[in-house]
Amino acid sequence: MNKKKIISFAMYVCTWVLLIVSFSSFWYKVNYIQSDRQVLTKFNEERILERTPNGEYSEVEGWQNANSRIHERELYSTSVSFILLAWVQITVLLLLIALSMAGALNNIRFLPFNHVIRGLGLTAITFSLIGLFVFVGLPAAKQRDCTDQHFTLCGVADQHQLYGTYNDQIEFAPQLGWIIIIFGALFNIAGTVTSFLVRYQE
């Protein structure tokens, strides 16, 4: 069996797994230092962690119906949608490569599967990068929500930049769910580059 074909398959499997991990992990954290409170957010839920004299308190709740966070919710939904599209492309791509390994694609002549597989890889890269860069707009989305609610203090802390600190009181940064997409995209790129050196259909 062609070693490069196995390498491309392995790279895409890594991408596939990393994107699943991304869906199930939190994408963002805001840490309120003085109150010893953390808020972890992903597209469908938030986890609030709070330390009190009586111990640790943890609560998980959905936030998709939060009327005061419309723009933030839309941004998460858009970003996750593109990542999901990338995952679907990778799933189809893995199936085709598995069929190629079994020699089945050689018996199907009505589609140029070499081009199809490479095209799916390139499309998945594009969707992943769009999802990544959409999320970079999170501070602007939060600021728009703040302005829409007519709050007096908008455009500071996590409404101003994606990561950092504010007055030594608030820490905020992307978390595993978003960061891991970067590594998924890198594996995707490696698999796609390798795919141009492989013939999946003779």
Image (spheres, grey):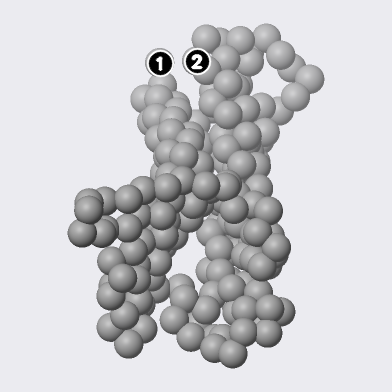
Tell me if residue 152 comes above or below residue 149 in the rendering.
below
Q: Which residue is mark 2?
A: 101
Residue 131 is marked as none
Q: Residue at x 35, y 55 (%)?
A: 49
Q: Are marks 1 and 2 in contact (CB under 8 Å)?
A: yes
**Closer to the observer: label 1 or label 2?**
2
Marked residue nearer the N-terminal end (1 or 2): 1
Q: In the rendered image, is residue 50 in sight?
A: yes
Query: Where is the N terminus found, in terms of image quarters?
Result: top left
Tell me if residue 172 comes above or below residue 100 in the rendering.
below
Query: Where is the C terminus found, in terms of image quarters?
Result: top right
- Mark 1 and mark 2: span between their CA atoms? 7 Å
How far from the left and from the top, in percent, is residue 152? 59, 90
Q: In the rendered image, is residue 193 in sight?
A: no
How far from the left and from the top, in percent, is residue 123? 64, 46
Q: Nearer the viewer, residue 15 or 143?
A: 143
How far from the left and from the top, in percent, is residue 27? 45, 55
Crowd around label 1: few <14 · some 14–19 · many ≥20 (10 Å): few
Q: Which residue is mark 1?
A: 1
The amino acid pointed to by label 1 is: Met
The amino acid pointed to by label 2 is: Met
Query: Residue extending furthest right?
Result: 110
Q: Residue at x 66, y 27 (%)?
A: 113
Q: In the drawing, does residue 24 fall left or right of residue 103?
A: left
